[in-house]
Amino acid sequence: EAGNLALQLAAMPTRGLWLTKKLLNASANNNLQAQLDMEEQLQGEAGNTADYREGIDAFLNKRKPQFKGV
């Protein structure tokens, strides 16, 4: 089961996963406004990645995305 999970995670947009983990870890110490500010900043960062563009293109073309971790 751990091997399957590793394969699933590897097929996902790794930069997006890293940003999500960063937000989750910060939420333990941030107040609401600080967390919302951080989410806004990192959402903008995520939206500028090749993986984001690949995800949108794959969705629009009804195909499985091929994320590269960038």
Image: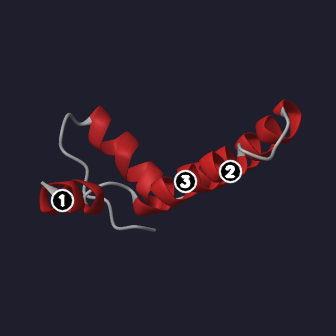
Q: Position of residue 70 (x, y in %)?
A: 46, 68
Q: Position of residue 43 (x, y in %)?
A: 64, 45
- Answer left or right for 57 relative to 19: left
Give the residue at x 19% y 45%: 64
Residue type indicated by callout 3:
Lys
Give the residue at x 23% y 62%: 6
56 relative to 69, above or below: above
Pointer 3 residue: 21
Label 1 vs 3, first from the N-terminus: 1
Label 2 vs 3, first from the N-terminus: 3
Residue type indicated by callout 1:
Ala
Q: Position of residue 18 (x, y in %)?
A: 52, 60
Question: The residue tagged with tag 2: helix, strand or loop?
Answer: helix
Pointer 1 residue: 2
- Position of the N terminus by quadrant: bottom left
Q: Nearer the viewer, residue 69 or 10?
A: 10
Give the Cα separation between the discs numbered 2 and 3. Answer: 11 Å
36 relative to 67, above or below: above
Mark whose residue sits in front, 2 or 3:
3
Pointer 2 residue: 42
